[in-house]
Image: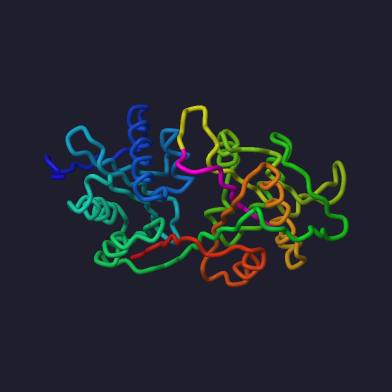
Amino acid sequence: MSVEPAAVIEQRTSLDPTTIADIIGFVEQVTDADGVNPLDEHVTLHIREGGDAHSVHLVARSGTSLVGYAHLDITDEVDGPIAQFAVHPDYRRHGIGRLIVTDLIDRSPGGRLRLWTHGENSAATHLATSLGFQRSRVLWQMRRSLLAALPRVTLPPSVRIRGFRPGRDDDAWLEVNARAFAGHPDQGRWTADDLRLRMRESWFDPEGFLLAVTGEGAVERVVGFHWTKVHGVSAPEGDSHGHTPLGEVYIVGIDPDWQRLGLGRTLTIAGLAHLRSRGLTQALLYVDAHNTNAIKVYESLGFVRWDTDVLYAR
């Protein structure tokens, strides 16, 4: 398909309802064509909310058609801005991706930019390397059948597992999340607003948000958690999914004082058992490719590598 007129990029710091709907529809078309969502959950949630004060949206249109989109997060002053982008399947091989990424580079101080690509994508790899990017981080997606047997759960003494209580456990969870991910600010810096956004999602299930706690009543302490997620749940706004429901090991975090006791493995197994109890037959998770210890644990639980996300930097 020829692109006439040439794509024009518009910068937005906030999104009106019409543009939000356009972007959501655009992302669904890209996902259907590629088999993978071009945007991560955090970006998707903020698009639905109309954006936030720390993000820039680049909307590329050819005439009235939305042909490309990019999200630029400028909050990280240490590692630099980070972006995600996509081009409509019908408008590829016309230089729109290069136009968008070049624009992102121009908007980044000193041209310093990190760029996520989701799924094995040779075109994105070629574009990134041709513009001076190098691989910075690799995430594996791993999957496991839930039809296979699960190991028995063995808890450390004095620890029990219960479900999350919205409105009561929020602060305690934010505290242990910050401690568990102190070295990973993209997760460890989550705020109450970040938590509330996810609790409003159609997939949120407090029974699948497992907390490991010690003590009782006023002296109870959250020492770890496994937040599970289900992909493929019909949302009120009519989001569609081209697959049967799929469970996810969404986040597993352990308080540093309670690490190396096998609690992470135990919570992972407990979460998988919960997903299986909901009738799901498969689970996925994401893990850094260099985190060999975690990969060994997941492989021992029956997970195998399925797909790859790559973070490029320049």
Inspect the magenta stretch and tell me whether residue 159 lies in it.
no
> Residue 253 lies in magenta, yes or no?
yes
Say how the picture is coloured.
rainbow
Q: Number of marks in the image?
A: 0
User: What residue is at 43 percent from the left and 57 percent from the top?
Assistant: 77
User: In which quadrant is the C terminus drawn?
Assistant: bottom left
Q: Considering depth in this image, is 220 or 96 the residue closer to the camera?
A: 96
Residue at 74% x, 59% y is 266
Magenta stretch mostly in which secondary structure? Answer: strand
Q: From the viewer's perspective, is residue 197 above or below residue 210?
A: above
**94 with respect to 219 (left or right):** left
> Residue 28's quadrant in the figure?
top left
Residue that lies at the very extreme toward the front in this rendered image: 147
Q: Position of residue 271 (x, y in %)?
A: 69, 51
Quadrant, the N terminus: top left
Q: Position of residue 285 (x, y in %)?
A: 57, 56
Q: Nearer the viewer, residue 8 or 124?
A: 124
Where does the magenta region start and end?
A: 241-254
- Residue sitting at x 23%, y 44%: 90
Q: Is residue 167 left or right of residue 241?
A: right
Q: Toward the viewer: 38 or 259?
A: 38
Percent position of residue 129, x then y = 29, 67
